[in-house]
Image (cartoon, grey):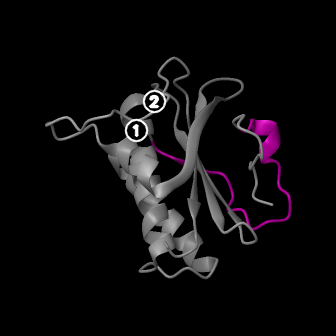
Amino acid sequence: MLTGTTTSDEPPTEADTAHTGAPTAPTTPFASSPRGARFARRRAVRWMEDWGYPPESDASCAVALVVGELTANAVRHGHVPGHGCRIRLGLDEEAGLVRIEVCDAAAAKRPPAAPPLTCPDGESGRGLLLVDVLAVRWGWTPRQPVGKTVWAEVSTEPAT
């Protein structure tokens, strides 16, 4: 079982993300900066490689893109002075999923329920569209004592 996976339509809570024996990377802090987001993405690729998914594999590339988008959003929209961000990955080999969790301290700045229907012409604004395409599902939950966790589940299986 993947840490944090639920079988209902309800998003998982932090109580659902207790270690269940599936390979789980440690919750790792990263600075709320572009450099910190880059570190988190590289760390995720390393964890994927440790789990048997080489950096050039489709699964690792998809996870890297989703981690890149979620950490960039955490840095850009979830920055609270004096607080960093956190990332955790969990692998569910049986279900063929990697769960990505990115935590920040900005509880008031919540992601939209769905990505925008159209791409803006600007240089940004497409991140959640990428997450929506690459993830099996994604969402967010409040985080105690402060902040939120944005999560996504990415398939490790080849696309059909």
Q: Which residue is mark 2?
A: 78
Of pointers 2 and 1, the one earlier in the residue sequence = 1
Mark 2: few/some/many CA within 10 Å (<14, 14-19, 20+): many
In the rendered image, residue 71, in percent from the top left (x then y), is placed at 44, 46
Q: Residue at x 85, y 64 (%)?
A: 21
Q: Is residue 151 left or right of residue 63?
A: right
| Residue 33 visible in this rendered orientation of the protein | no
Q: Is residue 103 left or right of residue 57?
A: right
- Between 42 and 11, the one lying in front of the other is 11
| Element class at badge 1 | helix
In the rendered image, residue 77, in percent from the top left (x then y), is placed at 39, 29
Structural distance between the alpha carbons of marks 2 and 1: 7 Å
| Element class at badge 2 | loop
Badge 1 amino acid:
Asn
| Residue sitting farthest toward the left | 121
Q: Is residue 63 left or right of residue 98?
A: left
Badge 2 amino acid:
Gly
Say above or below: 61 vs 100: below
Q: Are marks 2 and 1 in contact (CB under 8 Å)?
A: yes
Is the N terminus in the top left, top right, bottom left or bottom right quadrant? Answer: bottom right
Say above or below: 134 vs 30: below
Q: Is residue 6 left or right of residue 115?
A: right
Does the magenta segment cover residue 26? yes
Q: Which residue is mark 1?
A: 73
Q: Which residues are magenta?
A: 12-31
Say above or below: 28 vs 57: above
Say above or below: 94 vs 119: below
Q: Which mark is residue 145?
A: none
